[in-house]
Amino acid sequence: MRKVYFLLMCCFLGSHVCAQEVDEQPVVASVLAWHAAAAAADYDAYFALMTADAVFIGTDATERWTKPEFQAYAKPHFEKGKAWTFKPIVQHVNLEKGQTVAWLDELLQTDMEICRGTAILKLVDGQWKIAHYTLSMTVPNDLAKEVIHLKSEEEKALMLKLNTLVQP
């Protein structure tokens, strides 16, 4: 009878009350190791933490790279002995019900000041790997009009170019 009561309570109170405790630490550890590998210019360790079909989206509108494209872009930076340093300030992790896919958002201290990273990670052979990562610069609301003005001319030209590539 207790089991029936417990199941009914779960249905009425919501799944968050009865959900299993999820361990976000391995997801966070994987992302921290990925950031540390970049800061140490450890090319092999950095890319080993990405899935084979990973995608990296950079801050420029033209930066959408598959893993091999991103490796080609990043290799010269890593060869200099220092790629980039992203220090997480805040991280939030969510895991899907089966706990084989996670998504993370983070605020980062970078050489571009505060940036935001968003990631989708997959559990591959017992290790969390980054399947998709987007890096974006944050813009304080009070400065948005000024930033829009600064990038307007260049991005209008890019939009024209992109619109000619994507015709219905």
Image: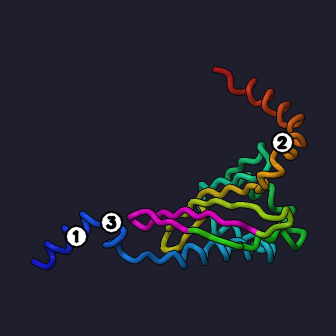
Above or below for 111 versus 138: below
The amino acid beneath tag 3 is: Ser
Name the outermost residue toward the top.
168
Quarter that holds the N terminus: bottom left
- Residue position for label 2: 148
- What is the number of the mark on residue 146? none
**Quadrant housing residue 82:** bottom right
The amino acid beneath tag 2 is: Ile
Instruction: Identify the residue at image location x=71%, y=73%.
Output: 89
Disc 3 to disc 1, C-alpha distance: 10 Å
Secondary element at image label 1 = helix
In the rendered view, does 18 fall on the left or right side of 82? left
Q: Earlier in the sequence, mark 1 or mark 2?
A: 1
Disc 1 to disc 2, C-alpha distance: 51 Å
In the rendered view, does 20 fall on the left or right side of 61? left
Name the outermost residue toward the left.
1
- Residue position for label 3: 15
Secondary element at image label 2 = helix
Above or below for 138 versus 99: above
| Residue 135 screen position, x and y as percent | 72, 57
| Residue 150 screen position, x and y as percent | 90, 43
Q: Which residues are magenta?
A: 93-108
Quarter that holds the C terminus: top right
Secondary element at image label 3 = helix
- What is the number of the mark on residue 9? 1
The amino acid beneath tag 1 is: Met
In the rendered view, does 46 fall on the left or right side of 16? right
Q: Nearer the viewer, mark 3 or mark 1?
A: 1
Residue 59 within the segment the image draws in magenta: no
CA neighbours of label 1 inside 10 A, class few (<14), some (14 to 19), many (20+):
some
